[in-house]
Each structure stands twice: as structure tokens, then as C-alpha cells.
Image (tube, rainbow, N blue to C red):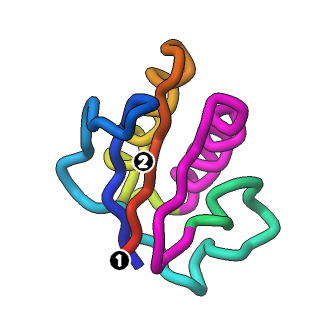
Amino acid sequence: MSWTVIKEDSEGTEISKLSEEFFLSENDILYSADFRVIRYLDPNGDTTFNSMMFDDLITDMTNLKKQRLKSADLIDKIISLAIDCKKEVHTYLKFYGD
């Protein structure tokens, strides 16, 4: 399963976008109780993370990075976008599913 990851404002306007898609397999991470928020990524729809969720998203991505060394650069970019969103008002990180 893959997602396009976009940082958006409150109107849904794209601020920045990852140049590559984020991949996870259903058996890999999704639905795992080990993760607080990425286990809720909708593979067939869209998932939006807001200011109250960024700390959990950053923690989940940091833990995921330890397991998925091949994807470390992409995960670092997602973490960076989440940190940027935390610093700005009314910004969201949206994962657009297939």
C-alpha cells in the first residue's frame, strides 16, 4: 500500500509534497498496536494528521525508521514535514491512499 504525503493548509492547499510515495505493507505495520497513529492509515482513502497528533506521528515514524532502514531517508522527510506542521498554525499532514 502506498500514500502520497502532502503538507496542507486549512483550505486543503498544498504547501509541500514528498517527491516519492510512502509504502507500507498491511502485514508490516498497519493495524499493529505497537504504533499509536500510523496503524490508522487508510490504504484506500485519505488520512489527515493534525496538531494534536504530530507528536505521536513523529514517535511512530522514529520507531518505524529503526525497523525499516531502507526507507530511512523517506521517513526522515515525513518526520521533517510533521515537525514543520507543529511549528505552524492550521497546517496538516495528509496521506492520500490509493
**Relative to 96, is 51 on the left or the right?**
right
> Residue drawn at (54%, 50%), measured in percent from left and top?
48
Q: Which mark is residue 98?
A: 1
Against 7, residue 74 (above or below) is below
Q: Where is residue 61 in the image (x, y as percent from the top left)?
A: 57, 47
> Residue drawn at (66%, 65%), measured in percent from left and top?
40
Q: Residue 90 carries which label?
A: none
Q: In which quarter of the image is the C terminus?
A: bottom left
The residue at the far front in this view is 11
Mark 2 residue crowding within 10 angstroms, few (<14) / some (14–19) / many (20+): some
Queried whether the magenta region covers residue 44, the answer comes back as: yes
The residue at the far bottom in this view is 27
Quarter of the image where one finds residue 58: top right
Inspect this view and state whether residue 80 appears: no
> Residue drawn at (35%, 51%), measured in percent from left and top?
5
Give the amino acid at mark 1. Answer: Asp
Q: In which quarter of the image is the N terminus?
A: bottom left
User: Which residue is label 2 attached to?
Assistant: 75
Label 1 or label 2, whichever comes before in sequence order? 2
**Relative to 22, is 33 on the left or the right?**
right
The stretch of residues the image draws in magenta is 42-67
**Relative to 94, is 40 on the left or the right?**
right
Against 26, residue 37 (above or below) is above
> In front here: 67 or 30?
30
Against 63, residue 41 (above or below) is below
Queried whether the magenta region covers residue 26, the answer comes back as: no
- Whether the residues at callouts 1 and 2 have beta carbons within 8 Å, the answer is no
Q: Is mark 2 on a helix, strand or loop?
A: helix
Distance of label 1 from label 2 (alpha carbons): 19 Å
